[in-house]
Amino acid sequence: MTCPAAAYLERIPEFLVVGGYRRIVDCAIAGDTPAGQIAANALSQLHRATLGPAESRIVVDGLTSFISTLSRCAACPLRAFPSDSGHLCRDECLILALVSALQHGDENAGRMTACALTCPARAMETLAACGDYAMRMKMFGQVLLPVPQDAVSTLLKPQPPQNFHQHNHTIH
């Protein structure tokens, strides 16, 4: 069964955000090992293939800074599916919504999403780091689709656990 939200992964900007996030999670889990180096190379290659060498470094630096900030500020362990998954977990959807909100100037959705991912005291720090990344993506023509506030509200409602979300990675 395909996750309905996975249609977002067919668009390059959304694929770069989620694919980059997942590869950073892979790097964090693997640490300083050969598997960690493979994940780091995959992160670079994912962006280089779409953006080119110079532009990809700028975008990956922004993404790395954003995810680093997010992992320090997260209210609970951040979740991610494996890099090759066709599904999206709640945290991945919230990250997409946050980047999208900041690219499209939707301050309410941005605040709601940042507060869902982090503790309220650290939301501004997360917004600043994500805003930098969102603008780097936008600067190189990688603009996400707008995510309506009602979709963000739906993501924030408690959901029953789904079987396909059992084996996702976490970072914290």
Image (cartoon, grey):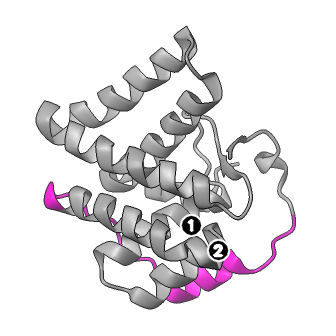
Region in magenta: 139-160
Number of numbered labels in the structure image:
2
Q: Quadrant of residue 82?
A: top right
Q: Is residue 54 above or below residue 112?
A: above
- Badge 2 or badge 1: first in the primary sequence: 1
* Residue 25 image position (x, y, % from top left): 57, 38
Viewer-proximal residue among 62 and 49: 62
Q: Is residue 137 left or right of residue 160?
A: left
Magenta run includes residue 154? yes
Residue 148 visible in the picture:
no
Which residue appears at 49% of the width and 34% of the height?
A: 23
Look at label 1 and name its amino acid.
Leu
Mark 2 lies on residue: 116
Residue 97 visible in the picture:
yes
For label 1, the SS is helix
How packed mark 1 is, by other alpha carbons closer than 10 Å (few <14, some 14-19, many 20 or more), is many
How packed mark 2 is, by other alpha carbons closer than 10 Å (few <14, some 14-19, many 20 or more), is some
Mark 1 lies on residue: 94
* Residue 130 image position (x, y, % from top left): 39, 63
For label 2, the SS is helix
Q: Is residue 96 above or below residue 2?
A: below
* Circle number at residue 126: none
Magenta run includes residue 157? yes
Label 1 near label 2: C-beta < 8 Å?
yes
Q: Is residue 167 left or right of residue 39?
A: right
Which residue appears at 59% of the width and 52% of the height?
A: 71
* Residue 105 image position (x, y, % from top left): 31, 84
Look at label 2 and name its amino acid.
Ala
Q: Quadrant of residue 20?
A: top left
- What is the spatial separation of the Cα atoms under label 2 and label 1, in whole angstroms? 8 Å
